[in-house]
Each structure stands twice: as structure tokens, then as C-alpha cells.
Image (cartoon, coloured by chain):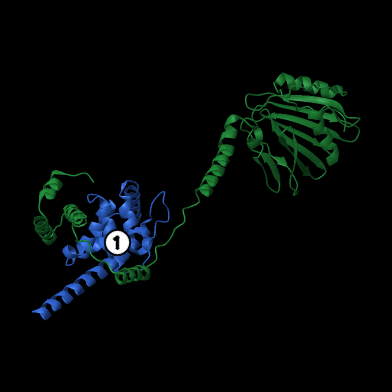
């Protein structure tokens, strides 16, 4: 503690004068504890000098009694320091979760957008459009079906860069018509492939805030993963549909085919023809 | 313990008739607590209240009583003020005096004692002080009797 002029004055006083000052200070109603402490420190320092014999004789009985009093009082609770590593781990996990939920959609990663498919007992729909993605570098459209080639040319004119057109359909299906519905709000291409008994409809619709409701039966949609995106397999009585979103377009393949055949058609979009 | 007793025996002749609040203030100043800060008053009130009613809960009983006695602050603000002041004094204060008053040591040497350690520790020290005062007065009486006998 730094010494003030007051302290220097006190040090200059004799022991008797200091004791008188101390008595006066202690008798005050509003005590100056700092000054009292300083006076006591000076008196204690004087009394403990080697030449002075004022060090009190403390007996072992007094020490033992004091220690007993000390022990009988409330024990000091020993508090373990909080494990900070746990708090840091929780904070790190929370930060990663925030990054995943907030940063990924901003960066355009399609993972989050693909998670917003919804359905009830009657209707299946996807609410938000997918973000534009780059096509794979080794993607080459090759097909034996001239109808699919024609469809591919139309879709490419529309500006869809990512693979969306199947490269394979079951034998016998030929292109019957391609209908183009173009408008500022809803650009749509509907292609129909027919054989003797049934048809396959492949529909491309621009998602600009307009939702399309797809009728379904009570069964839960099944998610197929292709190229990092979820493709939803939806059933509606005898019809089966596969629905997904890419490059801002919702693609629907509608047919009365087995699940394995539908899976092969969707697989051929990314991995070429053949089952 | 011996060092603490010697420390007390030197000053007991001056402070034997003093109120306990002065003793608490002197102990706190010895440990390095500045008198001008509100935490000094809060800590002194907490020690006095705990001395009257030991084993009370700090968060739900002691700090609210300190709030009522001193100011309109919340119990959390009282606790934070005391904790910060203790940490500052531990960091800057006289380590010899801390060792003198807490001979059993402190649980966390890095951050210093907790609020409860200081309040309970000083309450224990006050009991030792009262024992010293009692002993001093007893010796004075025995000394007077001895003089009377001589006379």
C-alpha cells in the first residue's frame, strides 16, 4: 500500500501518541478504517522489532483451542472449478449447427433446399426451388431413343444445364408429343412417351414461387439419392411418380411402372442407359 | 494458526472493546480490499449476516438480505461485485496476509477463493478473534487479582 503524508506523519509519532490517536479514531461514530489499519500496522511493526520484547507469548494450549474453534466452525466448501472444456464443446457444436443451417443455404449448397419436401395424406409438394448447380464435367448425353434426344434438345434450349433427361426408357416407348407452355411466370415442358398399353410423362416446370400439388395415396414418399439430391418416389393408385427439383425446375416422371423400372429411368439420367 | 494468533495478540489490547464491524473492516483491509468500493460494504454486510445466521444459503438467503440492507441492486449484482473484488484482491493483494488468514489454503490458486470461502473463512477468523479477546480479558482479570493479592 502506498504511503501518504498522513502515514508519514503517523510514523513520526511516538508509540504513546499513536495509541492516543488510535483511541480517538476508534471512538468516532464514523470510523476511518484505513487510518485505523495504518496505525495498527505501525504499532505492530514497532512491537515485532527484535529489540522490543513485546511479542506475546502464545502457549500451545491457546493454539490448540484456537484451532479447535477454527475446526468447529463451518468447513470451507471446496468448489471444483467448472469444467470449461464442456462449455467450449457445447459452444463449438452450436457454432457448427448454426453454420450448417445458416451458411449453407447462403452458399447455394442444394442440401438444405432438398430437405423442404412436404406431404400430407393427399398431396405431395416441394415448397422451395433448388439453387442452380454446375453439371458434372464428364456428363455426355447419349441415348438410343430418338424421342429422348429430341426432348434433350428442347430442354437444353430452355437453359437447363444439369442432367435432367433420362437416357433410357423401357423398350417400346416412343415420343408422342412435346408441349411447351411458356409464360413469364410458369415455363413448362410436358413430354409424353407412349407404347401400346401405357404412357410415360416427363414434365419440366419452372419453380418461381408457384407450387404444384401432386396427388398421392396414403403411403409415405420414398427418397432416392442421385447426384447429391433427393428424388421423391410417390405413389398414387396405379400411377407412380418421381419428383425432384434441379436448376430451378421441378421435374416429374409419371408412369404406371414398377418401382425398380422407375428407379432405372431416374438412374439413367446420371449414369447412362441400361439397368 | 500460531502466526494468526500472534497477529491478533499484538492488536487485541487496542481493539478488545471495539465492535466486530471494525474488526471485519481491518481484516478486509489487511487482505487488500479497498474501502472505497461498494463490494467492501457488501462483503462486510454478508459476513455480519452470515455470522448471525450460519449455514444459510448464499444465493437465496444471504445475498437478498445484503440487498435489503444496503441498496436496491439485485442479488446477482451483489454476487458479481463481491466475486470481482475478491479476484482483484487475490491477484494484487498481499499473499502473506492471505496465507495468514487462510492457513488451510484456497481451493483454486489461479482465480482465488470463492465468495463462500472468503465469507465463511472470515466468520471463522472472527470466532478466533473473540476467543483471543476473551483470553486477553481473562489474563487482565488474573493480572488485577494478582496485583490485589500482592497489595
Looking at the image, the residue that sits furthest to the front is: A51
Q: Colour of chain B?
A: blue
- Residue under pointer 1: B4
Residue B79, image x, y percentages:
35, 55
Q: Residue at x 75, y 26 (%)?
A: A163
| Residue A55: % across, % down | 22, 61
Would you say residue B68 is visible in this rendering?
A: no
The chain letter corresponding to green is: A
Percent coordinates x, y for residue A28 in the rendering: 11, 59
Front residue of A170/B68: it is B68
Parent chain of label 1: B
Q: Is residue A32 left or right of residue B124?
A: left
Query: Residue placed at 90% from the left, 35% from the top?
Result: A197
Judged left or right of residue B109, residue B35 is left
Q: Quadrant of the C terminus of chain A?
A: top right
User: Nearest the camera: B107 or B80?
Assistant: B107
Q: Residues within 10 Å of mark 1 (few under 14, many from 20)?
A: some
Amino acid at each position: 500500500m502506498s504511503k501518504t503524508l498522513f502515514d508519514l506523519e503517523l510514523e513520526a509519532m511516538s508509540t504513546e501518541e499513536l495509541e492516543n490517536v488510535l483511541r480517538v479514531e476508534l471512538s468516532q461514530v464514523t470510523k476511518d478504517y484505513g487510518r485505523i489499519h495504518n496505525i495498527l500496522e505501525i504499532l505492530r511493526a514497532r512491537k515485532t522489532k527484535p529489540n522490543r520484547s513485546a511479542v506475546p507469548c502464545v502457549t500451545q494450549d491457546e493454539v490448540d483451542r484456537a484451532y479447535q474453534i477454527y475446526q468447529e466452525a463451518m468447513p470451507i466448501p471446496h468448489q471444483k472449478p467448472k469444467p470449461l472444456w464442456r462449455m467450449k464443446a457445447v459452444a463449438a457444436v452450436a457454432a457448427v449447427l448454426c453454420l450448417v443451417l445458416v451458411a449453407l443455404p447462403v452458399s447455394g449448397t442444394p442440401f438444405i433446399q432438398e430437405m423442404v419436401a412436404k406431404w400430407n395424406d393427399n398431396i405431395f409438394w416441394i415448397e422451395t426451388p433448388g439453387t442452380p448447380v454446375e453439371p458434372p464435367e464428364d456428363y455426355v448425353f447419349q441415348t438410343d431413343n430418338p424421342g429422348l434426344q429430341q426432348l434433350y434438345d428442347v430442354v437444353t434450349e430452355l437453359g437447363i444445364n444439369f442432367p435432367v433427361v433420362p437416357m433410357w426408357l423401357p423398350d417400346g416407348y416412343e415420343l408422342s408429343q412435346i408441349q411447351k407452355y411458356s409464360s413469364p411466370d410458369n415455363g413448362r415442358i410436358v413430354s409424353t412417351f407412349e407404347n401400346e398399353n401405357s404412357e410415360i410423362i416427363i414434365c419440366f416446370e419452372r419453380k418461381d414461387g408457384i407450387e404444384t400439388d401432386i396427388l398421392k395415396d396414403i403411403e409415405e414418399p420414398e427418397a432416392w439419392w442421385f447426384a447429391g439430391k433427393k428424388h421423391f418416389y410417390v405413389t398414387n393408385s396405379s400411377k407412380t411418380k418421381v419428383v425432384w427439383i434441379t436448376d430451378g425446375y421441378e421435374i416429374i416422371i409419371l408412369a404406371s411402372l414398377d418401382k425398380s423400372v422407375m428407379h432405372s429411368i431416374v438412374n439413367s439420367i446420371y449414369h447412362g442407359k441400361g439397368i | 494458526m500460531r502466526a494468526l494468533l500472534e497477529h491478533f495478540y499484538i492488536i487485541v489490547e487496542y481493539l478488545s472493546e471495539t465492535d466486530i464491524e471494525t474488526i471485519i473492516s481491518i481484516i478486509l483491509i489487511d487482505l487488500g480490499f479497498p474501502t472505497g468500493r461498494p463490494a467492501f460494504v457488501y462483503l462486510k454486510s454478508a459476513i455480519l449476516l452470515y455470522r448471525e445466521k450460519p449455514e444459510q444459503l448464499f444465493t437465496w438467503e444471504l445475498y437478498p438480505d445484503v440487498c435489503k440492507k444496503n441498496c436496491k441492486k439485485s442479488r446477482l449484482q451483489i454476487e458479481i461485485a463481491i466475486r470481482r473484488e475478491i479476484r482483484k484482491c487475490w491477484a494484487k493483494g498481499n499473499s502473506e496476509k492471505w496465507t495468514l488468514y487462510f492457513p488451510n489454503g484456497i481451493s483454486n490458486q489461479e482465480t482465488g477463493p470463492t465468495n463462500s470461502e472468503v465469507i465463511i473463512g472470515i466468520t471463522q477468523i472472527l470466532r478466533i478473534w473473540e476467543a483471543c479477546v476473551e483470553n486477553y480479558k481473562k489474563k487482565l482479570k488474573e493480572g488485577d487479582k494478582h496485583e490485589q493479592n500482592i497489595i
